[in-house]
Image (spheres, helix red, strand yellow):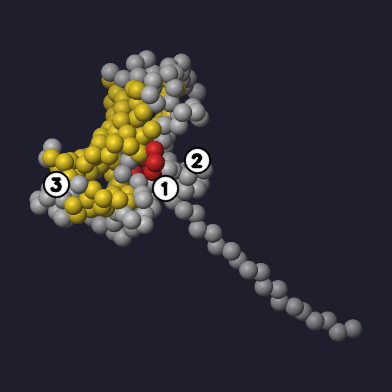
Amino acid sequence: MRLTSKLVVAPILCCAIPSTLARASVASPKGPIQLQVDATDTVHKVFSVTEVIPLHGEDSITLLYPRWEIGSHAPTISVADLAGLELQVNGQPVEWRRDPLDVNAFHVSLPRNATTLEAHFQYLSPVSGGVMSRNIVQVQWEHMLLYPQGMKVKDISVAAQLRLPAGFQAASSLRVLKAADNTIDYQLCPLSELADAPVVAGRFMSSWLL
């Protein structure tokens, strides 16, 4: 009997897992983004956001609104939930225009020698789904920020602050810098880490040390 051998070649499939936030070319970060989220309007289910973005002497910038969220592992974030976007430099409004092909991209022309860009907008939480109610608030940071194109998200530092309704307690994997008067300041962290650290807060919440 003659024995023969066969070489079986099994294909190896490589799967790229998309990150929560898109990445572009590298730029040098100048300072942290200051992000303030006001989650006190539980009646209208609206989060109010103020964001201060450091600039690098450029005459224009493109801001991106995230597409991917960790909870669904898919591009399920809708830019339609972002409302009332206003951009300012030194207290003066600056114009922005939406990219004709990418509705999540906002192109902004900047005055000379601008050092920071201030953004004001609202995130309209779903009417149902438990994101915001009179007794519960869930803060998913990737829904409540814009970030500059041209930087890796792991290189963008964010100082996040959250204001909650009176009497609410919060839980998150983020480290707390200080908390007073229903306002929590979190320690500086990369944007990639912030997007992976939602906050769950409620009126009837307790914690126990195990």
Q: Is residue 160 above or below residue 132?
A: below
Sequence-first tag of 3 and 1:
1
Secondary element type, mark 3: loop
Residue occupying image coordinates x 39% and y 41%: 80
Tell me the distance, in whole angstroms, between the alpha carbons under discs 2 and 3.
Answer: 35 Å
Quick check: 115 left or right of 17? left
Confirm or deny contact between disc 3 and disc 1 (CB under 8 A): no
Secondary element type, mark 2: loop
Confirm or deny contact between disc 2 and disc 3 (CB under 8 A): no
Frontmost residue, 151 versus 146? 146
Res 35 visible: no
Res 19 visible: yes
Tell me the distance, in whole angstroms, between the alpha carbons under discs 1 and 2.
Answer: 12 Å
Amino acid at circle 1: Arg
Residue occupying image coordinates x 50% and y 40%: 71
Amino acid at circle 2: Gly
Sequence-first tag of 2 and 3:
2
Quick check: 87 left or right of 163? left
The quadrant holding residue 136 is: top left
The quadrant holding residue 2 is: bottom right
Quick check: 92 left or right of 151? left
Frontmost residue, 15 versus 173? 15
Quick check: 8 left or right of 155? right
Residue 114, x across and y down, in percent:
12, 48
From the image, tell me which residue sits under label 3.
Answer: 115
**In this rendering, which labeled residue sits more in front, label 3 or label 1?**
1
Disc ID at residue 1: none
From the image, tell me which residue sits under label 2.
Answer: 71
Tell me the distance, in whole angstroms, between the alpha carbons under discs 3 and 1.
Answer: 27 Å
Q: Residues within 10 Å of mark 2 (few under 14, many from 20)?
A: few
Amino acid at circle 3: Thr
